[in-house]
Image: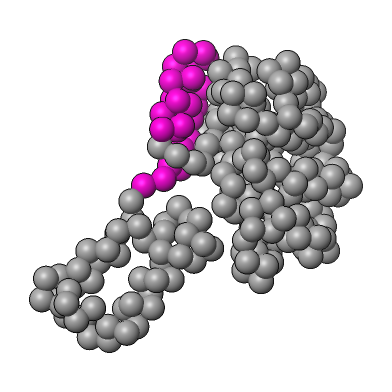
């Protein structure tokens, strides 16, 4: 299901589709081998469409083309293969117990998962989030960043063609107010994963507390210092790494070196 410029009512529509797909088991109760086959097919489709996907991504956020081709489409396909391969490799557990009872640890999909993406690596972050969720058997509702929705919409088409059932993957482009907050507050979403600013991440914690206490997983921005110690020798190489760390992908990177800490004895030399 794909929706453009979602309203709150359309988020409700996407969640309802995801819930129906989850409850009737069209994906959540299929055999692990089947989910594995479909996710491998999604990976193959992304690789086959890599050039077009890269063009869509670069058109959205201006990432340098060669880097985007490898880090976005290439890494996204590899991510789907990683989680596809894990589907039938992770087992439940039987706990040691006495002769007259048994205790089991059973892994089950959590349900409907809301996924809110950043704009710096839109395709890779999409794969990082929907890969494990789909592998587990969940249905998902995805809000791409407002600036970068094209690759998510295209992957939804590719996933449908690869055999993912209708209603399992739902894309709802829109602003934070139009789609992000309604996802965070929705009573029929069981878990939210958000990547972005610390301020917005705190809002998702509040949305959860004010609604159904859904599980919230956050990857939030922060300061990432590059530290140059007293025994640094090749300062030209150090400088190259600092520049790369700060400006790789135009600095649009959650681990960008946004601070520089230099030992006082070599500060002038550097």
Q: Residue furthest left?
A: 265
Quadrant of the image containing the N terminus: top right
Residue 67 image offset from top left, x and y in percent: 62, 68
Residue 167 image offset from top left, x and y in percent: 80, 30
Is 160 situated above or below 40? above
Residue 261 image offset from top left, x and y in percent: 22, 64
| In-image side of 130 versus 104 (left or right) | right
Is 214 contained in the magenta span?
A: yes
Q: In the image shown, does 38 or 210 lie closer to the viewer?
A: 210
The residue at the point 45 percent across, 53 percent down is 254
Instruction: Give the number of callouts.
Output: 0
Quadrant location of residue 267? Answer: bottom left
Quadrant of the image containing the C terminus: bottom left
Q: Which residues are magenta?
A: 199-222
Residue 65 showing in the rendered view: yes
Is 209 situated above or below 205? above
Residue 81 showing in the rendered view: no
Is 159 situated above or below 245? above
The residue at the point 47 percent across, 59 percent down is 251
Is 30 situated above or below 6? below
Is 216 contained in the magenta span?
A: yes
Q: Residue furthest right?
A: 161
Residue 59 image offset from top left, x and y in percent: 72, 55
């Amino acid at each position: 299901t794909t929706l453009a410029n979602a309203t709150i009512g359309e988020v409700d529509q996407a969640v309802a589709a995801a819930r129906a797909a989850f409850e009737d088991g069209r994906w959540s109760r299929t055999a692990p081998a089947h989910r594995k086959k479909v996710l491998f097919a999604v990976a193959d489709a992304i690789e086959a469409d890599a050039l077009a996907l890269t063009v869509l991504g670069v058109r959205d956020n201006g990432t340098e083309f060669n880097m985007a081709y490898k880090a976005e489409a290439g890494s996204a396909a590899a991510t789907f293969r990683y989680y596809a391969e894990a589907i039938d490799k992770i087992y439940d557990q039987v706990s040691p117990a006495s002769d007259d009872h048994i205790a089991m640890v059973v892994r089950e999909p959590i349900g409907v998962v809301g996924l809110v993406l950043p704009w710096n690596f839109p395709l890779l972050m999409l794969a990082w989030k929907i890969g494990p969720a789909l592998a587990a058997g969940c249905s998902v509702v995805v809000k791409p960043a407002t600036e970068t929705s094209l690759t998510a919409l295209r992957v939804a088409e590719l996933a449908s063609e690869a055999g993912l059932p209708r209603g399992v993957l739902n894309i709802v482009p829109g602003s934070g107010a139009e789609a992000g907050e309604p996802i965070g507050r929705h009573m029929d979403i069981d878990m939210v994963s958000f990547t972005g600013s610390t301020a917005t991440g705190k809002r998702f914690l509040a949305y959860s507390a004010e609604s159904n206490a859904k599980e919230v997983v956050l990857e939030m921005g922060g300061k990432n210092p590059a530290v140059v110690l007293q025994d640094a020798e090749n300062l030209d190489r150090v400088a190259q790494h600092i520049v790369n760390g700060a400006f790789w992908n135009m600095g649009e990177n959650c681990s960008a070196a946004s601070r520089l800490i230099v030992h006082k004895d070599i500060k002038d030399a550097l």
